[in-house]
Image (tube, helix red, strand yellow):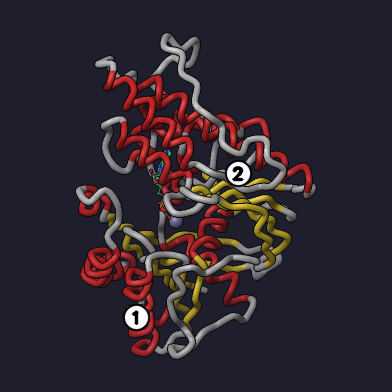
Amino acid sequence: MRILGIETSCDETSAAIVEASGGLTRPRFRILSNIVSSQATLHAKYGGVVPTLAKREHQKNLPRVLTLALKGTPIPKINAIAVTIGPGLEPALWAGINFAKTLAAKWKKPLIGVNHLEGHIYSNWLQPVGETLHPKSRIRNKSKIQKLKTIQPVFPAVCLIVSGGHTELILMEGHGNYRLLGETRDDAAGEAYDKVARLLGLGFPGGPIIDKIVSSYPSSPLPYPIKLPRPMLHTKDYDFSFAGLKTAVRYLVHDLNAKKKAIPVKEIAAEFQAAVIDVLKKKTLRASREYGARSIMISGGVSANSSLRAAFEESGALFPPLELTGDNAAMIAMAGYIRHTQKIKHTSETLSADANLQIAK
Ligand code: KG4
Ligand code: ZN
């Protein structure tokens, strides 16, 4: 069957068509189109995403991305419409939901409400075909369209979602069967990247910029020794905290400024990234051991990070293809297929936005 996916939870407006088959035992996916229109530059001047502005942009962009996504797929060939219902910015979510409802009524198609985080997890079901390049070389080849194939991760799986809005460690024991092991108590990992990049006078979003700076920098020994904290590295739970790390960078920059010393941007960026990765790696691998995980899946915007990929290389953790790490509608259509197969459908009356939608208790 063919699923139209719609995603508007944050600052990307996206529509995608995914061909799916195989049911719950062996789901298979083929992306026919995945159009993403980013508002990042628009929100950059405000230093973060402005919800009402995002909503207006989504409303403006949705018809455009839909037209592009539909290219080659006649309406009768679409079997269902999957749309993100949360978590996310409520006004932004409603833009996508109302659009999906209108299409569902006009085209007489079933509606599927999808949890955005579940979408990120399903981005791991597609992997690039061919020889596996070193993660860093994959970054450089980003513009090259990769051919993707479906893989079948084995359960139980430990899933780490790291994005601008989320840092969650989830135990997945089957399709639709999730247990939240831990989450961030303050800032998300991507949010920390963005805030630290701002403190260092780099652009927005900061994640890809810090990634690039650090990759092009000889690792050790650091000519300028800086030590930043690894918050909650040794706590017995699976929670995270990144606000303290950002504050440590703020004090360091403030201190250097007060002493009229130059800011060693590359060194600070490298140590900050090392601290984030140390914590993410340690807790994810510990959860994987404790729960006897047979797969580790890492997803979300930060999963594009080349050093994070390198750090998990030995563990065999799965990472999505680079074009699926950020918010996109193909992952929503994929998760929607699973929901559809489980007969979880919605009507226009029952479908509504839930800004704080949980994946599991
Ligand atoms: O998943 P996403 O596109 O949107 C949310 O749902 O939040 O994630 C965006 C986040 C931003 O904070 C961005 O800085 C971060 O992902 N990010 C990265 C990289 N690419 C994007 N962080 C570290 N390294 C990267 N290469
Ligand atoms: Zn996301």
User: Residue at coordinates 49% horizontally, 50% vertically from top-left?
Assistant: 186
Give the amino acid type for the residue marked by disc 1 in the picture.
Asn
User: Residue at coordinates 71% horizontally, 66% vertically from top-left?
Assistant: 25
Q: From mark 1 to mark 2, how far is it between C-alphas?
A: 34 Å
Q: Quadrant of the C terminus?
A: bottom right
Residue closest to the far front: 258
Crowding at mark 1 (Cα within 10 Å: few <14, some 14-19, many 20+): some
- Provide the secondary structure element on which disc 1 rests: helix
Above or below, comparing residue 26 to residue 236 in the picture: below
Q: Is mark 2 within 8 Å of ligand 1?
A: no
Above or below, comparing residue 230 to residue 318 in the picture: above
Q: Nearer the viewer, residue 138 or 284?
A: 284
Above or below, comparing residue 13 to residue 113 in the picture: above
Closer to the N terminus: mark 1 or mark 2? 1
Q: Nearer the viewer, residue 169 or 320?
A: 169
Above or below, comparing residue 2 to residue 298 in the picture: below
Return the mark for residue 318.
Answer: 2
Give the amino acid type for the residue marked by disc 2 in the picture.
Leu
Q: Is residue 273 visible?
A: yes
In the image, residue 322 lies at what x, y percent? 44, 44
Q: Which residue, given by chain and number where applicable, does mark 1 sit on?
A: 98
In the image, residue 338 lies at what x, y percent? 60, 70
User: Residue at coordinates 37% horizontally, 89% vertically from top-left?
Assistant: 105
